[in-house]
Image (spheres, rainbow, N blue to C red):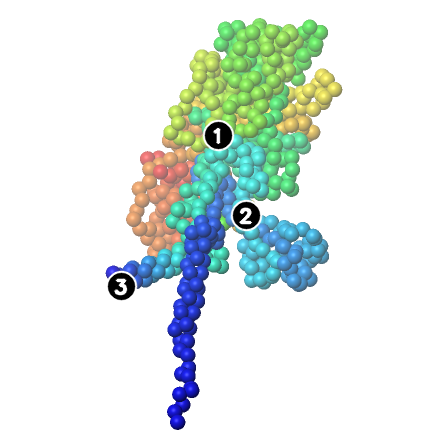
């Protein structure tokens, strides 16, 4: 009975240590995930800024492009 | 002799043992007493103290919802940014801190020094700094300098639909525009959880907290089309600048659904920098009331036709340009004698319109105006939408009725006018305007005018543009356009009408199968005041872009094909080959293949050809098939019209 109690006590301590270790690890992973998500959000904003029609127009004009004339448009299906 | 006198030493060990036993017994009793005191008497209190050390309450909150245009282009999104704060009492070397922060943040170190000398316990040095700056500050590890995470609302399209989107305050609450009216939908939720913390105060993960994204606000999708929006904003900006006007508004509506595709206010407003553009955030399209002027005439005529007061060919005498009604003079820009109703609209005769209005009567005209939606907000989910200004018909005098017949003496919003024209374009059915993209929601309208009445008014509006009317500058070759010009005098603050005008133009593209309604207005133009001159050309430009982007407008010059529907004229079914042979030594035979395929083949050899002619198939080419690839990279393709 005494040995069983000792064994259960040690088991409880071990489980608690494991739980705390896992909690640390999980917290660290959560922080990393949050940072990645934040970075992803910022990159999305940057991407949409670069894809904004007004931005594209300025860049296209700098590259010498201009809207097509009506006779330059062909619709293909 | 014996040593009987020596007594053996007294054995005190027993006493010592008893003494020691008593001491240990008392000590043990003390320990038990202490254990009892700690565990039983003070137990609950110590347990509470321990819980305070081991457990902490943590608030988990999500992000504000995102706003998209109808095509999924991001219009607003919240991101986390860092802000720099300083606790002056923790700073050891103020000079070093101010120098280093100043260098990283681009702030004068003297200003930071002044902040550090402050007696406050907490000072913001810079809000919402860049990631690079935050990293640099973190690496400096300056004592007393802290980085705090804050949510920042970003509008990646810049000024696009700025007034419509509105903005949020530092706490992330919507203050203006859609951000305000949809605040409940967009706002994130939050919840409190108990988490364990270690001796150093680090908080451990809690399974209760779950997925943070479940606390995010809901996303919102608007009916706005960014391409249309850009075209509208650019056209409006040109119109306001050319007219030297105070401000302007532009609206583009899909006639078939009532969805708003473009919503422009000028001067433009960038919600990313609210402080720099104070005042320009006013959403005039929804808020401002103006006298519509001649753009109201078609609505009045529709009411008169509905009430069978006249027909399009009924003639009214237009008094050679000057007419007195109850002592008030009404003028036309040109002298007209007899004009039929359709010509009253075509030439925008105020006197003719006044006479139709007087024949219609105040009660019937007022009834139709209310039926269409004047005198109440159109009901878009926007803050502060105006109801317009329309007095009850019983208060109207003869002069009021005559004035209102040509759009003076009543106040309307641009949205109300757009809804009225939408009703005409939709065969007399009033459709509610839509701002939220809900393609599954059925389009439900209410009939206000008979279909033949709406058709007659549409024909009159077409005459304004296609005949010798006031809106000829909005003509587009190959497409029938319907429109109406407006040149309204503005009421003077001192009473009566002053010298300022509101110039506007409403157009429907194409007139035979209405698809788009474009409304534009400029306030107090200084370079003239006619809507047909100042605004119509830019409305036309918006129309050209709309029709071009949807394939409803293309090659205009060939009258041979002008009568054919656009879809037949400019499209052809394309059979795609699996592979394009680009490794030939000489010019391939491009004749008879589609222009797309020819382009792909030529571009693969670094040649961008000059294309001329109409149609989608290559008719002739230069260099000819079999000739060498041109060293100067020049190639000409002539297209032939051979659909399907």
Q: Are marks 2 and 3 on the same chain?
A: no
Q: Chain of mark 1?
A: B
Residue B465 picture quarter = top right
Towards the viewer: A68 or B448? B448
What residue is rendered at 44% in x and 15% in y? Answer: B447
Q: Which residue is mark 3?
A: A3
Give me the residue at 47% from left, 47% from top. Answer: B57
Q: Residue furthest right?
A: B494
- Give how far apart the Cα atoms at labels 2 and 3 are: 55 Å
Q: Earlier in the sequence, mark 2 or mark 1?
A: 2
Q: Residue at x 67, y 20 (%)?
A: B489
Q: Label 2 neighbourhood size at 10 Å, few (<14), some (14-19), many (20+)?
A: some
Residue B470 figure quarter: top right
| Number of the front mark, 1 or 3 | 3
Horizontal side of residue B319 vs B168, given as left or right: right
Contact? badges 2 and 3 (CB < 8 Å)? no
The location of residue B114, given as percent across then percent down, is: 71, 54
The reply to whether label 2 and label 1 mark residues of one chain is: yes
Residue ID for mark 2: B150
Q: Name above or below for residue B608 compared with residue B340.
A: below
Residue B562 vs residue B39, the one in the foreground: B39
Q: Residue at x 41, y 30 (%)?
A: B438
Q: CA distance from mark 2 to mark 1?
A: 30 Å
Quarter of the image that includes the N terminus of chain B: bottom left
Q: Is residue B136 above or below residue A53?
A: below
Q: Which mark is residue B435?
A: 1
């Amino acid at each position: 009975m005494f040995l069983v109690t000792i064994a259960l006590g040690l088991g409880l301590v071990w489980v608690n240590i494991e739980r705390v270790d896992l909690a640390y690890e999980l917290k660290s992973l959560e922080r990393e995930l949050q940072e990645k998500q934040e970075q992803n959000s910022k990159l999305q904003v940057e991407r949409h800024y670069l894809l904004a029609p007004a931005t594209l127009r300025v860049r296209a004009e700098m590259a010498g492009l201009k809207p097509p004339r009506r006779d330059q448009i062909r619709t293909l299906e | 002799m014996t040593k009987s006198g020596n007594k053996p030493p007294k054995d005190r060990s027993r006493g010592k043992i008893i003494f020691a036993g008593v001491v240990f017994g008392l000590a043990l009793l003390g320990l038990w007493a202490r254990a009892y005191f700690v565990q039983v008497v003070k137990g609950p209190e110590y347990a509470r103290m321990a819980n305070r050390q081991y457990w902490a309450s943590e608030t988990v909150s999500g992000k504000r919802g995102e706003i998209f245009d109808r095509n999924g282009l991001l219009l607003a999104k919240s991101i986390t940014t860092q802000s720099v704060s300083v606790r002056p009492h923790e700073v050891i070397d103020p000079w070093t801190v101010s120098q280093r922060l100043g260098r990283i943040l681009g702030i004068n170190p003297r200003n930071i020094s002044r902040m550090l000398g402050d007696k406050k316990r907490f000072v913001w040095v810079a809000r919402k700094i860049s990631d690079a700056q935050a990293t640099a500050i973190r690496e400096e590890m300056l004592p007393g300098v802290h980085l705090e995470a804050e949510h920042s609302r970003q509008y990646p399209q810049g000024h696009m639909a700025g007034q419509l989107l509105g903005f949020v305050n530092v706490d992330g609450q919507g203050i203006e525009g859609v951000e305000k009216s949809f605040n409940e939908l967009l706002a994130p939720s939050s919840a409190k959880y108990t988490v364990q913390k270690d001796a150093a105060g680090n908080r451990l993960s809690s399974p209760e907290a779950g997925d943070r994204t479940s606390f995010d606000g809901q996303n919102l999708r608007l009916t706005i089309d960014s391409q249309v929006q850009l075209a509208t904003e650019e056209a409006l900006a040109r119109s306001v600048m050319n007219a030297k006007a105070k401000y302007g508004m532009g609206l583009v509506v899909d006639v078939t659904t009532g969805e708003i595709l473009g919503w422009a206010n000028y001067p433009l407003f960038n919600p990313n920098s609210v402080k720099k553009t104070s005042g320009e955030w006013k959403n005039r399209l929804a808020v401002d009331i103006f006298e519509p002027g001649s753009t109201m005439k078609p609505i009045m005529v529709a009411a008169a036709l509905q009430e069978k007061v006249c027909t399009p060919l009924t003639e009214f005498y237009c008094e050679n340009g000057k007419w007195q009604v109850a002592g008030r003079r009404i003028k036309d820009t040109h002298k007209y004698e007899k004009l039929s109703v359709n010509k009253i609209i075509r030439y925008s005769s105020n006197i003719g319109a006044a006479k139709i209005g007087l024949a219609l009567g105040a009660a019937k005209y007022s009834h139709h105006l209310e039926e269409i939606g004047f005198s109440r907000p159109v009901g878009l989910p926007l803050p502060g939408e105006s109801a317009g200004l329309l007095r009850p018909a019983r208060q109207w005098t003869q002069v009021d009725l005559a004035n209102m017949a040509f759009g003076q003496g009543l106040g309307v919003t641009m949205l109300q006018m757009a809804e009225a024209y939408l009703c005409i374009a939709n065969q007399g059915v009033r459709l509610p305007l839509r701002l939220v993209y809900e393609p599954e929601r059925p389009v439900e309208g209410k009939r206000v005018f008979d279909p033949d009445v709406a058709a007659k008014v549409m024909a009159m509006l077409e005459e304004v543009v296609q005949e010798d009317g006031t809106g000829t500058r909005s003509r587009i070759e190959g497409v029938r356009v319907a429109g109406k010009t407006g040149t309204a005098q503005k009421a003077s603050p001192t009473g009566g009408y002053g010298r300022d005008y509101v110039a506007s133009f409403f157009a429907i593209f194409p007139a035979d199968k209405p698809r788009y309604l474009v409304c534009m207005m400029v306030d107090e133009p200084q370079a003239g005041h006619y809507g047909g001159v100042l605004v119509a050309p830019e409305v036309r430009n918006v129309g050209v872009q709309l029709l071009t982007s949807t394939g409803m407008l293309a090659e205009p010059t060939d009258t041979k094909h002008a009568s054919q529907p656009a879809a037949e004229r400019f499209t052809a079914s394309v059979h795609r080959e699996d592979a394009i042979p680009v490794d030939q030594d000489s010019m391939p035979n491009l004749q008879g293949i589609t222009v797309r395929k020819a382009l792909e083949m030529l571009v693969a050899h670094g040649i961008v050809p000059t294309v001329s002619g109409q149609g989608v198939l290559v008719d002739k080419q230069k260099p000819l098939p079999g000739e060498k690839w041109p060293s100067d990279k020049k190639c000409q393709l002539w297209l032939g019209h051979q659909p399907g």
